[in-house]
Image (tube, rainbow, N blue to C red):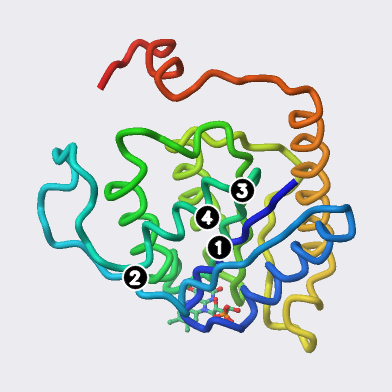
């Protein structure tokens, strides 16, 4: 099983990276292949075309978002990891989910049936708002969300950074366990879940 973490912190190797690394190391211990994308190490630019919501042709913006979306499509599970900034999502992660969404995911929903999960890291305030926003984005893109107990919201202010938040790290490991348990079972069963078009018809929408 392949798990990809997207680290949406402007500080490419900070607390969010550390939390995502912990999740991936734990997943490796359960036999998974893992990969991390640090958005800060890529070129992610906002779009000013004004046609994103109506254009049926591919996004013309020349940056790394398309390549990162391709890596998400290759994965069996994607973990969005982001810090809280100003009680909200870091602006880098915000830019990425906007660009990926309207530029690459909107029409085909190619991440349908990928397992999705969220890690939010911050000093103390606003974690659940950011968590909810990222969950909504996963739902929009028709990911499979696996409940694992409390949301993975991690306080980064302790002496050992994210590792000091024992309850947060426990939630993180439980979340990885659920990702791996459900993902492994789905892969082993060979179940073919409905494709995006079929999902569209099922909920009564064709555009
Ligand atoms: C611009 C900025 C705004 C922040 N706003 C918040 C906030 O609203 N709530 C909070 O709990 N932490 C806030 N923090 C603290 C970060 O979320 C925290 O330090 C986190 O560990 C940073 O992750 P990183 O090391 O991956 O960048 C803020 C940090 C920065 C740089």
Which residue is drawn at the image coordinates 62% and 61% (left, top)?
A: 5
Position of residue 53 measured from the top left corner of the image (x, y, whole percent): 18, 41
Secondary structure under tag 1 reads strand
Q: Which mark is residue 44?
A: 2
Marks 1/4: CA–CA distance: 10 Å
Label number found at residue 75: 3
Q: In the figure, is residue 62 to the left or right of 203?
A: left
Q: If you read the primary sequence from the N terminus, does the residue marked by circle 1 or circle 3 appear first?
A: 1
Q: Which mark is residue 71?
A: 4
Q: Earlier in the sequence, mark 1 or mark 4?
A: 1
* Secondary-structure class at tag 2: loop
Q: Which residue is mark 1?
A: 6
Mark 2 vs mark 4, foreground winner is: 4
The local secondary structure at tag 4 comes to: helix
Closer-to-camera residue (169/207): 207
Could you tell whether 155 is left or right of 193 in the image? Answer: right
Of badges 2 and 3, the one in the foreground is: 3
- Disc 4 and disc 3 in contact, CB within 8 angstroms: yes
- Which comes before the other along the chain, label 2 or label 4? 2
> For numbered disc 3, what is the local secondary structure?
loop
Q: Is mark 2 within 8 Å of ligand 1?
A: no
Q: CA distance from mark 2 to mark 4?
A: 15 Å
Residue 195 as seen in the image, left or right of residue 66: right
Q: Could you give the CA–CA distance between mark 2 and mark 3, rounded to whole angstroms?
A: 20 Å
Q: Is mark 3 within 8 Å of ligand 1?
A: no
* Left or right, residue 170 beside residue 203: right
Residue at 61 percent across and 77 percent down: it is 123
The CA span between labels 4 and 3 is: 7 Å
């Amino acid at each position: 099983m392949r798990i990809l973490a997207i680290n949406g912190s402007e500080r490419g190797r900070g607390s969010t990276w550390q939390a995502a690394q912990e999740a991936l190391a734990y997943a490796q211990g359960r036999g998974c292949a893992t990969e991390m994308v640090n958005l800060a190490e890529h070129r992610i630019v906002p779009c000013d075309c004004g046609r994103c919501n109506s254009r049926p042709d591919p996004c013309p913006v020349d940056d790394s978002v398309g390549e990162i979306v391709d890596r998400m499509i290759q994965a069996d599970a994607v973990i969005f990891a982001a810090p809280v900034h100003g009680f909200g999502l870091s602006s880098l992660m915000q830019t990425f989910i906007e660009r990926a969404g309207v530029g690459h995911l909107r029409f085909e929903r190619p991440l349908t049936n990928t397992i999705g999960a969220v890690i939010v890291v911050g000093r103390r305030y606003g974690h659940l708002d950011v968590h909810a926003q990222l969950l909504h984005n996963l739902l929009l893109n028709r990911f499979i969300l696996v409940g694992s107990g409390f949301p993975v919201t991690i306080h980064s202010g302790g002496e050992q950074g994210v590792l000091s938040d024992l309850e947060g790290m426990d939630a993180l490991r439980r979340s990885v366990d659920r990702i791996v348990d459900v993902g492994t079972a789905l892969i082993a069963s060979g179940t073919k879940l409905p494709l995006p078009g079929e999902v569209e018809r099922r909920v009564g929408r064709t555009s």
